[in-house]
Every structure is written in C-alpha cells, then in structure tokens.
Amino acid sequence: MSGLRAESSSSAPAENAGPESFFETLRDTFEQAGARAGSSERWFTIGGETVKLRFAGPALQPLIAPALEHLAVGSANAPALTVCFWDSSSTDTRMPAPPWPTTAYGRRGEIIGYNTDRFRSVYQHGVNALHMFDAHRRIALYWVAGAGQIPYWERSFPMRTILHWWTQGRALQLMHAGAVGGPSGGVLIAGKSGSGKSTTTLACLDAGMLYAGDDYVLTRVEPEPLVHSVYGTAKLAPDNLRRFPHLRRFVSNPDCLAEEKAMIFLKDVCPAQLVRSFPVRALLLPRVTGRRDTAVRRATPIACLEALAPTTIFHLPGSGHDAFRKMSLLSRSVPGYILDAGTDLEQIPQAIRGLLEGGPS
C-alpha cells in the first residue's frame, strides 16, 4: 500500500469512487500515458482466442511479450480480451490516488470492496503493481510504478492473474503445471516447486517431444480435456543447468543467477516444438528419487488433485470453488500416474512416450 500511496501522493483519494468509477479513471490515465509517451500493440492467440495487448510507453513490452512470442498473430477486429499496460516512470504519468483505505487489502492483495461479479482488483505489494479487470467488457489494466520493479518470475508468466480472471466461469482454467506430448496428445505434469516438473519437461523437449508449458498452462476441462500453451518459458534452478548445458547460452538473466532461477525463452531454442494445444491423455506427478532408472505407477484422482490444486489456488487471487471444481473434474476425467524420475534423463521421455502409447509397463 505504501508504494501506491507514495506514487499517488499529489492527489487526494476520490470520495465514493466505486470499482467502475476508479476503473474508468485508470483507463483514462492509461490513454494519457500513451498520448504522452507513445503507444504500441501486440496480438496473441491464447486459449484459442485472440488477446490484444496495448502498451503505453516503451518500457513494458520487452518485459511482457517475450514469454508469449510463440503465440503471436496479426491484428484482429474483435479481441476476446484487451490488456492495457503502462508504468509511471517511463511515461511520466502519475498514478491516481486510490479511493480505498489502507485497511482494504485482503489476502494476496485483493482489494476489499473492489472485487465484485464484474470487477476484479489486486495490488501487488513489493512490486508496486495494480491490476484491474472488467469482466463485462473484457478489458484489463496493468499498472506498475516502474518497469524495473517487475520481478524476473513475473516476466516468465506475465498477466497470470488477469488470465485467471478472464477464464472464471468458463471451461478454461489456468493451472500450475507443465505439459509435453505428441501430435495425438500429451500429459499434464503437476506438483509443487522442486518436484521435478522443469526437469521432466526439458528432458522431454531434448528428446524431440512437443512442449506446451513448464510452469503454467491453460486447460480446458470439458467436454474433452485439452491443454493450451500460454508461456514459452522454462525456469531452472542454476545448479540444474549442468544437466542441460546446451541451454546455458540461451539464459536471459545470466548475471542474476545468484538470486534468481535461470529463465529461458524457448522460442529462441526450439520454436518448432512449441505448440498451441493438444489433448490431455493423462496427469503425471513427478517425484525426484535419486535413483538412476525411471518408473511409472498409477496415482489416484485424489493424489492428482492434491498436486494441482493447492499451489494453483494459492497463486491466483480470487480463485476458490470454481477453480477447485475444474481441477477436480480434470483429475477424475483422465488417468493419473506417478513418475519416479531417475537421474538418467533419457529414460524420462521414454517412459512418458510408453505411457501415451499404451500405459505403464
């Protein structure tokens, strides 16, 4: 809160400004920023629909667009979602003072009184970023005080919260999972940080398999499960780079590995293997065993749900019953397996291919 108040200190909070009124104030501020600093736009296909990103000023597009570049398309007449990005620093445009009190922040930055059936609002403390979404017009606003405050991990999955809001009430759900496979379908790879998701997805990528995501994917849960790629990025703990030495030259943040995971934009590595979507044939729960050989065994729907739901719900503001219902449905709709991942990385894609071709041996 202190960052937003400090940035807005020259203006008093607007009295009785509800979410619709403040949303319009922010939208006007974005247009002013674009008129002052110049504007640009990019178009992408996400979840089978066209999404338009508008940028005021030059600072944010290089931080937001690279993770989505494999989904870039030409312009369209009627986007299913429009997201407006700007920062105060590069546009020299001051943020309007927020109309809510300092006590209005709930868990995960949700702003009490500014989250309704139509409007969603979150302020990210530390990052000093404000997101708002109008579900009726399918327009989102993304403001940050300065581009330098956007952390590396958000550059790997930009507008994650906004995409979650956009899909609420629909058959789509953003999920904390990776996805790899082949033309006829693939596996959704779920588990908490450190479970082996990134190692599994990158081992499969090295083996020539198709790749839909490493950390977050958009999943359609009905009528038939289908995974949509959103982010063409991979993140690895720096000490895990030794297992994928050929990727080292593609690391986008090589000078920051003492504090950050290595981040790689895979469009620069293997563009032909990045796909927009494929059917989900199974849920896979990786486990790091320390043993050489990889093995696959059945997992219960409850185990699959426990791997998917907690981190997804924790990370996404406003998630709850609807997200849990979708993940529960998916866990019951496709078979689940535990992947006891061995240190011989070549065995991991072999095991997954065998699973997709006929089940575990």
Image (cartoon, grey):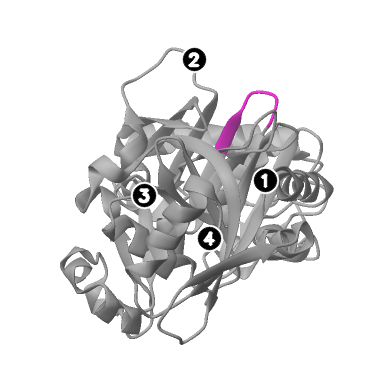
The disc label shown at residue 308, or none: none
The disc label shown at residue 7, or none: 4
Which SS class for mark 2? Answer: loop
Residue at the disc numbered 2: 78
Image-based side of 230 in relation to 262, left or right: right
Q: Earlier in the sequence, mark 1 or mark 3?
A: 3
Does any portion of residue 131 appear in the rendered image? no
Label 2 or label 4, whichever lies nearer to me, is 2
- Magenta stretch, residue numbers: 135-140
Q: Distance between the residues labelled 4 and 1?
A: 49 Å
Give the image quarter of residue 342.
bottom left
Q: Distance between the residues labelled 1 and 2?
A: 34 Å
Q: Are marks 1 and 2 in contact (CB under 8 Å)?
A: no
Residue at the disc numbered 1: 334
Q: What residue type is labelled 1?
A: Val
As drawn, 327 above or below 300: above
Q: Which amino acid does label 3 sit on?
A: Gly
Label 1 or label 3, whichever lies nearer to me, is 1
Q: How busy is the neighbourhood of tag 2: few (under 14 within 10 Å), some, or many (20 plus)?
A: few
Q: What residue type is labelled 2?
A: Ala
Q: Which amino acid does label 4 sit on?
A: Glu
Residue at the disc numbered 3: 232
